[in-house]
Amino acid sequence: MNQQSLQPEPTAAALPASDMAMALAHLPQALLVFDAQHRLIFGNPACASLLDLPTELLARWVAERCTGQEIASHQGARGEPAEDFAPAQNSSRTRRTAAGKTLQLTTQMLPCGGWLRSYCDVSALAAELEAKSASEVVLRFALEGAGDGVWDWDVRANITQYSRRWKEMMGFSGADLDSDICYREPPRIHPDDFDAAWAAVHAHLAGKTPGYVSEHRRMHKDGKWRWLLARGMVASRDAEGQALRMTGTSTDITARKLAEEQLLLAANVFKHAREGIVITDAAGNIIDVNETFSQITAYPREAVLGRAALMLRSSAQAPGFYTQLWRDLHAGGYWSGELWIRRSAGDIVAIMLTISEVKGKKGETQNFVALFTDITQTKHHLRQLERNAHFDALTGMPNRVLLAQRLQHAMAQCRRRKLSLAVAYLDLDGFKSINDRHGHATGDELLIAVANRMQSVLRDGDVLARIGGDEFVAVLSELAQPRDCEQALERLLQAASAPVQLGDLLLEVSTSIGVTIYPQDGADADRLIRHADQAMYLAKQAGKNRFHLFDIAHEAAAKQQREGLAEMRNALALGQFKLCYQPKVNMRTNAVVGVEALIRWQHPERGELPPAAFLPLIEDQALSVDVGEWVIAQALRQIALWRAEGLDLQVSVNVCAMQLQQANFVSRLSALLLPTAGEQQCGLQLEVLETSALEDMAQMSKLMHACQTLGVHFALDDFGTGYSSLTYLRRLPIELLKIDQTFVRDMLSDPDDLAIVTGVIGLAKAFGRQVIAEGVETAAHGARLLGLGCELAQGYGIARPMPAAAVPAWVAAWSEKPHWLA
């Protein structure tokens, strides 16, 4: 084989033989040519630098027509994997040298039976590709028009879905195009590319890179490898920053890869490459271009020969861009990136450009070779995607996604500058009826008009976003005082309520606005919007066409109640409640007539809590029914235990209004009393607040009579603190009145309290009811009550509430007569 055999077939656009010889001799890529007997017949000077081969050694190998075995032995001696110098077909792969270079190896069979192996230093390209990142999150299937396949990876489930274009690109056809193709296993990537591709994926998932970019080979359905440019970005993360979903595109760059490799072998590839190719001299003057160059730039080949390549530069690049490009190119011999160039008609296109420097024998720059692809359509798609992802399609205003970003930014600014901002949630009043009456097209026009009016009354730094339907959110930032937002809110109300003329129609709507102020409302961005939404509903309830400020104190109290209810519900499930019992006695006979069950909470952190510390929290809450039923069940269980010990005591239990109002109260109580069925008295007394008894007299009377058939007795608790109506004393089957302790405690010193106590005792006698005094703390109280005709009492002067286990001993010891019996 001679050098002439390396020349391409003559074509109209082929390079002259002298130019081809010069290119082969001065290419930056290393070339080794073997004849049909696998003997080395040619090696260019670049072999010395790329393969670390001494020039004299290479010359000897060529002169002696040695085989590839000697080169392989030379590699092995340096600790590198030995190459296979007996290829069976065209191939391409990469390898890393002992010096740390990344080389692209390409094998091309020659018509004469021999073959050529080229080595290209792609170290800089590899580093550049690792640093690439996707500019924006690519939405599913949106790049179909640009010829890109789209994939969507569920990171946690490890399931990947692919678009129709991706399936076409990878060889799927027929029914496969319309069916879901999902993979759980790792993609079928070429073994030589797998580690680098997945390293790029994991680096992006870990947040080390802004995007994922990888060029690798993947198995086509026909079993062959296809080169893909994969670009992606994490689309969503959880609260801890872990990636949930990653979306991206795959571009088939096989043709580009083949073109880059074959460009080194023949001028025919130069002519037919899908990338534009430009060859310049050392001064940057164009000496040749391919047809794709003319197709992209619209410049004929003859019109650019001899002219400076800078003729293509556009004003779209930043000042100093081209100066830095040439500086980097001369420093590293390679440059790659995106830029905008000017076409012959003056319009500009975006390209992905790679420039390589070609050096001569003495290291001097002889040529530059540039390859580029037209990525204008992809750029336009990305811009449209960015707008669709961040702006409302109807009004052109920021959408929910962009609102979240700008709100976060505004909150950060407020924290730094110690200012406030207002988040206003706007909902148009009356829009739905107009939309229903005049149609969606008219509704859309009205929305656009009202949105533009509201936008026009805001400051430049404020944000107005449409988040769906007829709902908007405004962010009014940089407020020195919280009240500074009120003028802007009034302007929004006026702008929304002004009539809108649409053709022959004169339409009117208004808006209700809910407002919350940050940082007075210290919630995060999402909760600020929710708080403003809650306030908006209150504005609607108040009459619409107004604004309402979110009540931070009320929200804090509601939050405290929610947390308290959750804690109490958990306490009930964990058995943290217990009952204590306070004895009730007959002061005249000294007999123990019963006990009152009083709930306590054994809090794991705050210790034992009295009822007043937690029962108000569950008032009018469903949990109060569950707690009340638990108390009754525990009291009945204790009655049974005491009776087994020979102690027969009536136990009174407080029952809340909500529990009494349950439709199944009697049936539930009957189920709890089932173990005592057949006994004449169950020993249970229910204490009802007089306010509960008055809510529905007829229903309460019916309920009490039903319970009495079960052996249950009733007492009216805290008598005198409510309405104290005589009607329910006549109509309700109440057996016992309890005088509230607030009257008993001060009856010895307060004439009014004494009068109330005296009156209650008189009422009880008049209606034939028993009466008991709560809060008897001293012997003087007991003696005075006995003098008034009240014999039953309970209070600290008799006994404090005690555990169930202590009651029998206390009853047995209650023998010494109190002072009031003396």
Image: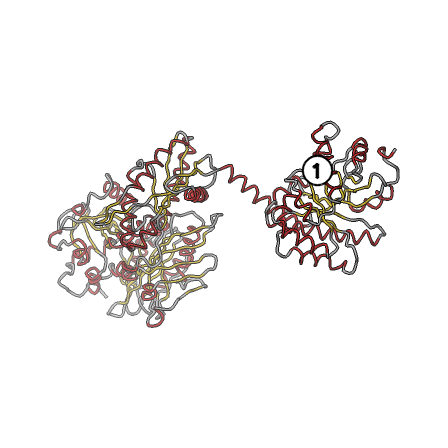
Which quadrant, please, contains the C terminus?
A: top right
Q: Residue furthest top?
A: 749
Q: Residue at x 13, y 48 (%)?
A: 307
Q: Depth check: give the residue in front, 7 or 204.
A: 204
Judging by the rendered image, the residue that carries numbered circle 1 is 740
123 versus 192 height, above or below? above
Which quadrant, please, contains the N terminus?
A: bottom left
Observer able to see residue 529: no
Observer able to see residue 785: yes
598 versus 263 height, above or below? above
Measured as percent of width and height from the top left, residue 37 is found at: 30, 69
Q: Residue furthest front?
A: 766
Q: Is residue 211 left or right of residue 115?
A: right
Q: Residue at x 77, y 33 (%)?
A: 777
**SS of the residue at dot 1?**
loop
Q: Residue at x 19, y 47 (%)?
A: 282
Amino acid type, mark 1: Asp
